Image (spheres, rainbow, N blue to C red):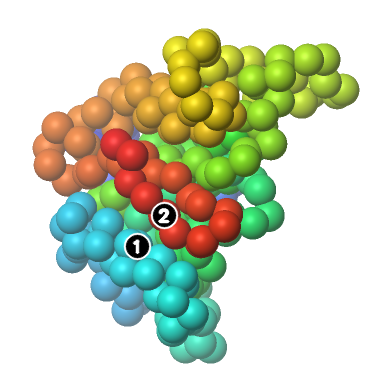
Amino acid sequence: MAHHNCGFNRRSALKLGCCGVVGMATGATLWPMGSVAAASLASSDSLSPHEALERLLTGNQRFTRHQLRHPDQTEARVLELTQAQHPFATVLSCADSRVTAEIIFDQGLGDIFDVRVAGNIATPEVVGSIEYAVALLQTPLLMVLGHERCGAVTAAVDNGPLPGEMGTFVEAILPAVNQVKGLAGDAVDNAVTANVRYQVNQLLRSQLIRDRQASGQLDIVGARYDLDTGAVTLIT
């Protein structure tokens, strides 16, 4: 991706905090984060997309086997992260309390750029957050992670009235539900898989994400988490 088109380089990107994402759109002053050169973290560029995926899946195997290492959770790691972040993966997952990426992949602070929203949907705000991670932090892996018996997907399959703003995530999932309507098998389970694939395609509407993928610097995968076993299975 040509960084000059965004008006940002990698050094300036790493100075962005969470509010810095808003600053890109509004022109607001970016939070000063000190000298990036002072950080002692290894860059995510040191991992290939394949290696990043293997690191996630190996961590999930440790999780399912109850052989957790709890990496990158020391006081030293906290201090390392005060100046910069170099996550090796971006994970778009459901906000469900049972599907926390750092836990199910046995990772630690600064390892995963974790974007969570009900139904793992690619709303404009979510896409913008992921663009920040993929294009500016340059994570080599982007995973969309759905899960078994997802409440948001179930609501979309039922497609009944919901209070407040909860109907908005149903609208974002309905196209996926309609793709598998009438197929054999469990309607919710079919829709969970279809929704992962649909949200991957929604993310690929982003030129920034497509550019990183086309360059070979980013791999995009869809996956499903099994609540019963704790295992993550790739589906795209």
* Identity of the residue furthest to the right in this view: 163
Q: Residue 26: x and y, percent?
A: 55, 29
Quarter occupied by residue 80 = bottom left
In the picture, the disc for residue 218 is none
* Identity of the residue furthest to the bottom in this view: 75
Q: In this view, does 134 lie above or below 207?
A: below
Disc 2 + disc 1, Cβ < 8 Å: yes
The amino acid sitting under disc 1 is: Leu
Q: Is 197 situated left or right of 158 in this image?
A: left
According to the picture, the residue beneath numbered tag 2 turns out to be 232
Quarter occupied by residue 187 = top right
Q: In this view, does 24 lie above or below 103?
A: above
Q: Residue 174: x and y, percent?
A: 58, 15
Q: Is mark 1 on a helix, strand or loop?
A: helix
Q: Is residue 16 visible?
A: no
Q: Is residue 232 above or below residue 188?
A: below
According to the picture, the residue beneath numbered tag 1 turns out to be 56
Badge 2: how crowded within 10 Å, few (<14), some, or many (20+)? many
In this view of the protein, which residue sits in the foreground, 114 or 70? 70
The amino acid sitting under disc 2 is: Val
